[in-house]
Image (cartoon, rainbow, N blue to C red):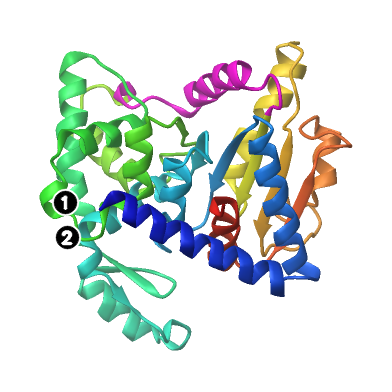
């Protein structure tokens, strides 16, 4: 059965790749093809790839393609916001309770208030159900936080969710195909994940609340962003030799800003000779403006010691919910 599923998926990815190869010939469409080809070439040559997730890509169900990328070894490490880390799991256990609002642009304040009264937290056209998603995960992860707190143990945010996943506590609540959850795929691979600014997330807020109430005695039970940078520095030094590590950035913000700085930090602050990022692609709808980092063209990163003059660089100015699955399908094609 599994072999048949893999053949079906491969056929699908090949068909998508064939379609975009035929029709995507100019402008952002052509850049998409160029970036996808360079991604495949980088991996084929023995390179590794970091994927960064900003925005609400997990609520947009990017796991439908990202999970397969992880399982097939096309992603070596992920950096994501705390929201993306948790929202893939929210969707896993509460998908049937999500509410889509197609006409979200037309909602009045009173209609938004009615969604609040129903405990539906809106993300563009999709509402996350508080009870079935957020509180269900809170109960599961609180057990892990409390256990670590009592034992004097400390773990990163992604490690706590890995522990919840591996405990089997969520299996009875699965409401999507587990194969479509990128966090489940990452847990299976024990994939390194970097989560800068985790405190700015729903579970981060919940953790703070439990610390305030005294349920968690040691606020340092969850390891910090500085420790994540140290963890990333160690990982990068161990993996940047040879063809190096590429950087595939979905959106902007801290998910991209934080990890790309590990190279100049190692080179300029620790004075350690460090290979630059070996590939760079960003999918963004942010335009270049005065001081906008998310909209900055890749060449600006040369001046900061992140990319080289000869590094393959691409920026696809489009909607990541459209572009990322197409790039992934191309990379996964035979």
Residue 320 seen in this snapshot: no
Q: Which residue corresponds to mark 2?
A: 131
Pointers 1 and 2 in contact (CB under 8 A)?
yes
Tell me the residue that label 1 is attached to. Answer: 136
* x and y, in percent, of residue 73 in the image: 49, 37
Question: Would residue 146 appear left or right of 232 to someone viewing this image?
Answer: left
The single residue placed furthest to the left in the displayed view is 172
From the viewer's perspective, is residue 45 above or below residue 110? above
Residue placed most toward the observer, 234 or 252: 234
Query: Residue 207: which disc?
Result: none
Going by the image, does 88 lie left or right of 62?
left
**x 51%, y 24%: residue:** 226
Q: Is residue 290 magenta?
A: no
Quick one: SS at disc 1?
helix
Which residue does the image show at 69% across and 22% down from the upper left? 265
Q: Residue at x 80, y 69 (%)?
A: 27
**Above or below: residue 36 compared with residue 301:** below
* Residue 70: percent from left, percent from top: 45, 42
Residue 204 visible? The answer is yes
Which residue is rendered at x = 57% and y = 43% of the image? Answer: 254
Per the rendered image, the range of residues in magenta is: 220-244
Classed neighbour count for the residue bearing mark 2: other residues with Cα under 10 Å, few (<14), some (14–19), many (≥20) = some
């Amino acid at each position: 059965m599994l072999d048949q599923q893999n053949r079906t998926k491969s056929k699908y990815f090949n068909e998508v790749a064939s379609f975009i190869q035929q029709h995507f010939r100019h402008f952002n469409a052509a850049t998409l093809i160029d970036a996808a080809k360079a991604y495949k070439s980088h991996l084929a040559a023995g390179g590794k790839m970091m994927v960064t997730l900003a925005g609400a890509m997990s609520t947009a169900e990017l796991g439908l393609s990202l999970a397969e990328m992880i399982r097939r070894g096309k992603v070596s490490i992920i950096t994501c916001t705390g929201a993306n880390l948790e929202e893939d799991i929210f969707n896993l256990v509460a998908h049937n309770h999500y509410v889509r609002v197609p006409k979200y642009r037309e909602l009045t304040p009173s209609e938004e208030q009615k969604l609040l009264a129903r405990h539906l937290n809106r993300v563009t056209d999709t509402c996350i159900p508080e009870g079935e998603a957020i509180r269900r995960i809170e109960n599961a992860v609180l057990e892990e936080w409390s256990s670590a707190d009592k034992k004097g143990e400390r773990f990163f945010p992604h490690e706590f969710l890995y522990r919840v996943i591996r405990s089997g506590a969520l299996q009875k609540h699965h409401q999507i195909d587990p194969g479509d959850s990128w966090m489940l795929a990452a847990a299976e691979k024990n994939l390194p994940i970097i989560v800068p600014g985790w405190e700015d997330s729903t579970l981060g807020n919940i953790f703070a609340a439990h610390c305030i109430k005294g349920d968690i005695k040691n606020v340092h039970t969850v390891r910090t962003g500085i420790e994540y940078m140290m963890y990333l520095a160690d990982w990068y030094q161990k993996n940047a030799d040879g063809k190096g590590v590429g950087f595939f950035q979905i959106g902007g913000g801290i998910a991209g800003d934080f990890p790309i700085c590990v190279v100049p930090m190692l080179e300029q602050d620790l004075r350690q000779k460090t290979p630059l990022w070996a590939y760079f692609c960003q999918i963004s709808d942010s335009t270049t403006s005065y001081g906008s980092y998310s909209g900055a063209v890749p060449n600006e990163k040369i001046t900061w010691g992140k990319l080289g003059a000869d590094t393959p660089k691409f920026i696809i100015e489009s909607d990541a919910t459209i572009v990322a699955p197409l790039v992934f399908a191309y990379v996964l094609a035979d």
